[in-house]
Image (tube, rainbow, N blue to C red):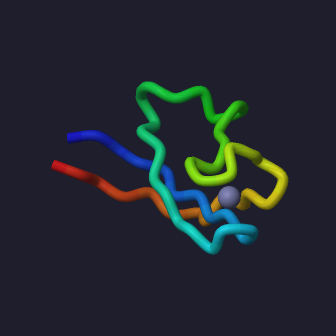
Amino acid sequence: MSKYNVYFCSGCEVKFAVDQDFEDHSVVDCPLCHSDDSLTDAGEAVDVE
Ligand SMILES: [Zn+2]
C-alpha cells in the first residue's frame, strides 16, 4: 500500500496523484503542461492498495 499526494493544476483543471515514496515533491509538475505554475497541493492523501 502506498500513499499518494493529490495535486491540482488550475491551468489544465486536472487532478493527479503523486506517490509520496518515490517522488521529490519539490519538483512535481503537471503531467499535461509540464509546468508547476498553476499547481496547487490539493491537500489530499489517498491510500492505494
Ligand atoms: Zn497543467
Q: Is residue 23 left or right of residue 30?
A: left
Q: Is residue 17 left or right of residue 8?
A: left
Give the vertical position of 2 relative to 14 (above or below): above
Q: Is residue 29 left or right of residue 31?
A: right
Image x and y of residue 45, in percent: 44, 57
Q: How many marks?
A: 0
Image x and y of residue 18, in percent: 47, 44
| Residue at figure coordinates x 68%, y 44% from the top left | 34
Of all residues, the one furthest to the front in this rendering is 33
| Residue at figure coordinates x 72%, y 32% from the top left | 26
Of all residues, the one furthest to the right in this rendering is 37
Please name whichever residue, 7 or 12, is drawn nearer the observer in this view of the structure.
12
Report the quarter where the N terminus lies. top left
| Residue at figure coordinates x 63%, y 74% from the top left | 13
Q: Is residue 39 left or right of residue 23?
A: right
Of all residues, the one furthest to the left in this rendering is 49
Image x and y of residue 28, in percent: 65, 38
| Residue at figure coordinates x 36%, y 58% from the top left | 46
Give the vertical position of 33 relative to 23 (above or below): below
Q: Quadrant of ligand 1?
A: bottom right
